[in-house]
Amino acid sequence: MSLRMNRRRMIQTSGAAAAGYWLGHNASPVRAASPNEKLNIAVVGCGGRGGSNLGGVSGENIVALCDVDDRRAAGGFGAHPNAKKFKDFRRMLDAVHSEIDAVVVSTPDHTHAPAAIAAMSLGKHCYCEKPLAHTVEEVRKMTELAKKNNLATQMGTQIHAGANYRRVVELVQSGAIGTIDEVHVWHTVAYGGLERPTETPPVPEGLDWDLWLGPAPERPYHPTYLPTWWRHWWDFGCGGLGDFGCHYMDLPFWALKLAHPTAITADGPPVHAESTTPGLRIQYDFPARGDLVPTKLAWYDAGRKPDFLEEKGVPGWSAAVLFIGSEGMLISDYSKHALLPESKYADFTRPDPTIPNSIGHHAEWILACKTGSPTTCNFSYSGPLSETVLLGNVAYRSGETIQWDAENMKPIACPAAEAFVSKDYREGWEL
């Protein structure tokens, strides 16, 4: 199979037996008979974040491993000597599709959707790192495909499984700070602000640079792109918002039952055509939801914060989610939270816990693959969260306030924004 063969061509040429499996998978999407039977899993991306995710599922049968870089994959490959090894996930899926139940995708953002959609099109359950994809359109396709094929899914927002977020959600939903119509989220993360390198050093031995580029436009290899800093570049990542937005905005999404914003406004330094930009402020406007009032959510990165923090006596947390309610405030990060002003809540009686502790973020997904039980960050939930995060970059890059038609996945009367909702793909990588 050609390295540039797209998924449609791959499916057409994979043989009658495989075709029969694909046609029939909807009737029986769960392979394992009980929670005690191990899943057969393939993993795409085995270094860095991928290595951690591989560790999270390593109690199951690891059938196949895929990574474009032998150096980065060495640890994962060595830990699973019996797994089949690949560099191209398309070849992997073609070779082992009849042997696997599920796929873990831990690649850079620009190859999330090609790998995940290829796997889910074969009826495979999917765990995918955040944000779900590189563009809003890709996220929507993944969300719809997972639902259509009745697949167990989980986005890699691992902190969602922690106890701290659960306690914050309970406080918000119990009315501890009253009616909430405003949330502020900030983080020190700072990517971008770079110029494209002009040097053309040799590609390191063991790295398939063409496969790493995947659907992105061709360009010479340079170490500034990988393994660590691909989020500096629009062709590969989504900047600081893409890195931490899903983690921190997850909390207000969960607590306030948010979904799709109706308007998005952004400001920051001048837009660069190729490099992402630090120092953004994004405001999302969400409509009323049942008995929940319309809500504004603001994101800040690279040292920007709300300008009222000192005035309101808010502690100087470097990264936080701040809920502002009619009766008080609630601030949280990953591991701790506080009701404000502290003097008012000194004798506050917390509500009894109502959200059960998680069995573990990866464990939730594994159990769901086996039994059909729910996951807390399935694509029906994490899809709208990821779309919202990515829409912040769409608004920033377009330079306009977006009025967003979520049902039709379209900015209203804003052609400048439409260009960033989807993207073009290198030949052979079309979805």
Image (tube, grey):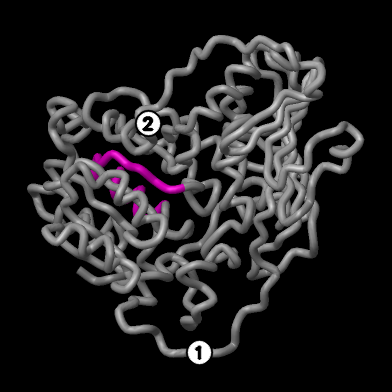
- Mark sitting on residue 363: none
Question: How many neighbours does mark 2 have within 10 angstroms: few (below 14), some (14-19), or many (20 or more)?
Answer: some
- The residue depicted at 65 percent of the width and 19 percent of the height is 172
Residue 316 painted magenta:
no
- Mark sitting on residue 147: 2
- The residue depicted at 34 percent of the width and 31 percent of the height is 364
Q: Residue 146 at what x, y percent from top left?
A: 36, 36
Question: What segment carries the magenta color?
Answer: 113-129
The residue under label 1 is 200
Which is nearer the eye, 333 or 96?
333
Q: CA distance from mark 1 to mark 2?
A: 44 Å
Q: Residue 366 at what x, y percent from top left?
A: 27, 35
Residue 119 painted magenta:
yes
Among the 4 quarters of the image, the one containing residue 170? top right
Among the 4 quarters of the image, the one containing residue 7? bottom left
Say if 18 sits above or below 234 in the image.
above
Q: Residue 295 at what x, y percent from top left?
A: 74, 26
Residue 145 visible at all: yes
| Amino acid type at image mark 1 | Thr
